[in-house]
Image: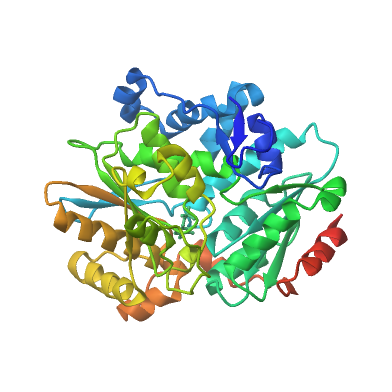
């Protein structure tokens, strides 16, 4: 399997090189040459298989011969080594809980898979590998935990100052070791732009081997397909509609990829907060990037989602091409908070703000389509967000892993949004 760049000006590369480079030299995103088709034998029988086996079968064609099967099996088993329960709220709506990993975020899966692939590939590179990542909240913690103490790898995480929750900040600033947290006085979009600039800086690339651990990296992006297979375990009846709380659109793009491989999913709902470039695109046909605005679902505060281009690559370039497969909704903070309250009251279920956006978009869709059923992805544990207790006026039990964070000491490097400051930080790490 080779990967091409969505900008079509860089050469095709193997999975190994796509992981090691993160982004193509022409600033495009790597995309698989062919979308593997799952056999009907697999599609009728996967529900009986273990999570590790499903993960292995799904990812194997994408990895090809760059990682031996026995190593890949082990990577897959470690990647999905926690539970992914589907919880029914009503007869028609269930939550797929993706927050039972080590940092209580769905990004644990991609981060764990990528760190293990990179560790395997770094065995035969001489240079230290730098992993650069911009985070709007949960990526940083998941990447920090996934890569901590991985030999030969330095991790530099950029996050927008004052725009991540306290727990999220502690998760990415207290690990130390090979993890450096950079606090940028700007937005997530600024952080992402700085990372992209460093990745394409030819002078730096001469001296440092860089890659990105954002979902633009195929090793973070592709394993997110697993969730959609887990979602369909024990599912009976017509294929579900799946609502995906979306920011950078990596998760939703992975779902579309899984469905194009043969997984039966009726439709996807791109559940967005006030950052509504994609909902507007689907309505007007025009894609107009916006500066991101801060919301309760901060991990989705993205004004120009980088993975959206992968969805266009799969479904077609125009809004009308997407419509049969993707709907979109934009949910305000007020409605998000109301939804958290409503669901708590009706079902005694605590949503986090991202899951609340997913739930609301799905519930609204289903009231217009009463014969369908759906699943929304619950992407983070509610205890990570102070806004949940405020909205519910209730105390939430804090899981032990989060309590332990408060004993750590925050360490970060503060910079402005200028590229030179970032460059200085990086050069000091060599
Ligand atoms: C990252 C994140 C999202 C958005 O996922 P994308 O793949 O960027 O669309 C949603 N919810 C939570 C909690 C996240 O951390």
The vertical placement of 307 against 396, above or below, is: above
Q: Position of residue 381 (x, y in %)?
A: 42, 61
Q: Position of residue 116 (x, y in %)?
A: 64, 39
Residue 363 shown left or right of residue 9 in the figure: left
| Quarter the N terminus occupies | top right
| Quarter the C terminus occupies | bottom right
For the point 36% across and 22% down, which residue is it?
Answer: 42
Can you see residue 288? yes
Residue 156 shown left or right of residue 430 in the figure: left
Image quadrant assignment for residue 409: bottom right
Q: Position of residue 103 (x, y in %)?
A: 53, 57
> Considering depth in this image, is 261 or 177 the residue closer to the camera?
261
Can you see residue 80? no
For the point 45% across and 44% down, which residue is it?
Answer: 312
For the point 15% across and 56% down, which residue is it?
Answer: 368
Q: How many marks?
A: 0
The structure's colour scheme is rainbow
Quick one: which residue is furthest to the left in this view?
Answer: 371
For the point 70% across and 72% down, which residue is it?
Answer: 417
Image quadrant assignment for residue 274: bottom left
> Considering depth in this image, is 202 or 69 the residue closer to the camera?
202
The vertical placement of 153 against 133, above or below, is: above
> Considering depth in this image, is 398 or 285 the residue closer to the camera?
285
Residue 166 shown left or right of residue 89 in the figure: right
Q: Position of residue 361 (x, y in %)?
A: 28, 60
């Amino acid at each position: 399997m080779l990967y091409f760049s969505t900008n079509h000006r860089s050469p095709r590369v193997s999975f190994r090189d796509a992981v090691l480079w993160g982004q193509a030299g022409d600033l495009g995103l790597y995309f698989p040459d062919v979308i593997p088709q799952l056999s009907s034998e697999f599609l009728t029988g996967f529900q009986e298989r273990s999570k590790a086996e499903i993960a292995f079968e799904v990812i194997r064609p994408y990895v090809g011969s760059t990682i031996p099967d026995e190593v890949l099996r082990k990577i897959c088993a470690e990647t999905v080594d926690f539970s992914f329960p589907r919880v029914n709220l009503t007869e028609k709506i269930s939550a797929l809980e993706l927050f039972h990993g080590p940092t209580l975020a769905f990004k644990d899966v991609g981060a764990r898979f990528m760190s293990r692939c990179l560790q395997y590939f770094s065995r035969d590179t001489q240079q230290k590998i730098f992993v650069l990542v911009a985070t709007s909240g949960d990526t940083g913690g998941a990447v920090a935990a996934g890569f901590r103490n991985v030999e030969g790898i330095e991790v530099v995480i950029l996050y927008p100052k004052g725009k991540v929750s306290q727990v999220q900040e502690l998760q990415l600033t207290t690990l130390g070791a090979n993890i450096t947290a950079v606090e940028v006085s700007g937005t997530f979009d600024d952080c992402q732009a700085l990372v992209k600039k460093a990745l394409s800086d030819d002078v730096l690339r001469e001296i440092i081997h860089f890659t990105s651990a954002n979902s633009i990296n195929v090793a973070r992006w592709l394993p997110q397909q697993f969730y959609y297979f887990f979602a369909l375990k024990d599912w009976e009846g017509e294929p579900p509609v799946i609502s995906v709380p979306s920011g950078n659109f990596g998760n939703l793009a992975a779902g579309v990829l899984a469905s194009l491989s043969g997984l039966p999913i009726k439709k996807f709902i791109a559940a967005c907060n006030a950052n509504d470039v994609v909902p507007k695109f689907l309505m007007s046909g025009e894609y107009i990037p916006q500066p991101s605005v801060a919301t309760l679902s901060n991990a989705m505060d993205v004004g120009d989602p980088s993975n959206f281009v992968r969805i266009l690559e799969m479904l077609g370039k125009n809004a009308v091409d997407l419509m049969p497969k993707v709907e979109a909704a934009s949910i305000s903070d007020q409605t998000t908070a109301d939804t958290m309250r409503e669901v708590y009251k009706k079902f005694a279920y605590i949503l986090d703000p991202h899951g609340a956006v997913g739930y609301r978009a799905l519930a609204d869709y289903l009231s217009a389509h009463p014969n369908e059923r759906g699943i929304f992805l619950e992407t983070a544990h509610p205890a990570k967000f102070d806004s949940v207790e405020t909205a519910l006026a209730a105390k939430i039990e804090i899981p032990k892993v989060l309590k332990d964070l408060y004993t750590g000491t925050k360490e970060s490097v503060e910079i402005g949004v200028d590229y030179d400051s970032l460059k200085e930080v990086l050069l000091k790490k060599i």
